[in-house]
Image (cartoon, grey):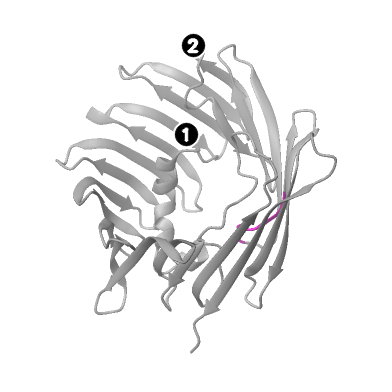
Amino acid sequence: MRILPISLLAVLLGSSAFAQQTNTDVTLDGLSGPVKSVASAVTQSGLKWQQPSGPTMVTPIWCRDCEYDPDGWKTKSGTAVEGKFYGENIELRRDSSGNVVERFFRDASTGELHHREKIGPFGKTEQWVYMNGKLYSVSKFTYDERGHVTEWLSLDPSGKQVDRSIARTLEDGTVTERAVYGKNDQLTWQQTFDPETRMEHFTTFDDQGKMKLQWIASDGKLISFWETAHGASQFGDNFTEPAEEGTVVSYHCHADLTCEQSKVHYEFLNGNKHNPLSAEWRDSDGNLQLAAYFDYVVDSFGNWTQRKVWVWDPSMAQRGLYETDLRTITYWTK
């Protein structure tokens, strides 16, 4: 089942990754081993290259300049520019058993509280976001017995619902339903997946509950598409579907019911799929349209300390150097 390209769903489905018994901030940032700190230097060549909307081909450095505690929890996150750090300091509070139960994120320059979180056995259970010292929003998270997020409720400072997201997940991790409800609990969009038939339905609705857009896919292949007639693109008419291993198919559909199709294929440095070796974007006829290639130098823990990014598009005779990244990584010792 594909993942919709919106920040709301990314937080909804990703929040369970903070589970204290499974992943840590170190692993979420694509690192391994007892990492204490990471300091990055990025040098761009000035080569003009840009990918279209869709799957990311040149992945960013997940955390440019960060620090972690011995358990892998992040204590500092941001970017250092000419000796000045821009980002957040993160205060961890633990219970009598040593489990992290609360986190406070403060501006590294001013000390102002940006947000705070309560942490449960599966991840954050509540989150408060502040702007200019005032409460801006509140979020509450619910999990099933296996640690999958089942509901994310977003509230304004007065406690009124802004939106509510739900997810239904099978024991093996397969997501069978996602839906988002707005104010007054009006359904905004819904996505369902039947693992037996491999049929997937996606539908969006207007403020009156009328259908705006719908598509149906079978085993990752689009079989129908419909949307209300209008000229502008709308949410849901650009989406991706997983295909064979390491490949995603992108669809860009229009009101005349036609859909442009392309594929991006990835090869990875290691099993966690954080670090690609290559990403190639091809059109529906298989012609290469865009490409990115990566060279790494890795340390004894398998973390890269140097990365060179090479890119290509049809205007180039050969691939060109796009970016050179250096990382200094320190580790906790016993």
- Sequence-first disc among 1 and 2: 1
The quarter holding residue 208 reads top left
Instruction: Describe residue 274's horizontal placement relative to residue 141 as left or right.
Output: right
Q: Amino acid at mark 2?
A: His
Q: Amino acid at mark 1?
A: Thr
Residue 269 x %, y %: 70, 61
Look at mark 2 in the image and give the residue it sits on.
230
Instruction: Describe residue 27's horizontal placement relative to residue 293 as left or right.
Output: left
Between 237 and 181, which is closer to the camera in this rendering? 237
Between 311 and 81, which is closer to the camera in this rendering? 81
Q: Is residue 273 magenta?
A: yes
Q: Above or below — where is 272 with respect to 222? A: below
Can residue 23 be seen in the rendering of this structure? Answer: no
Asked which secondary structure carries label 2, the reply is loop
Q: Is residue 173 magenta?
A: no
Name the residue: 24% across, 79% down.
Answer: 96
Crowd rating for badge 1 (residues with CA inside 10 Å; few <14, some 14–19, many 20+): some
Look at mark 1 in the image and give the residue it sits on.
192
Range of magenta residues:
272-278
Residue 258 x %, y %: 63, 16
Q: Indicate which disc residue 19 carries.
A: none
Instruction: Describe residue 142's horizontal placement relative to residue 73 as left or right.
Output: left
Alpha carbon separation for disc pair 1 and 2:
25 Å
Can residue 167 be seen in the rendering of this structure? Answer: yes
Q: Which one is closest to the eye, mark 1 or mark 2?
A: 2
Name the residue: 49% across, 65% down.
Answer: 65
Residue 109 x %, y %: 32, 62
Instruction: Describe residue 161's horizontal placement relative to residue 3 as left or right.
Output: left
Asked which secondary structure carries label 1, the reply is strand
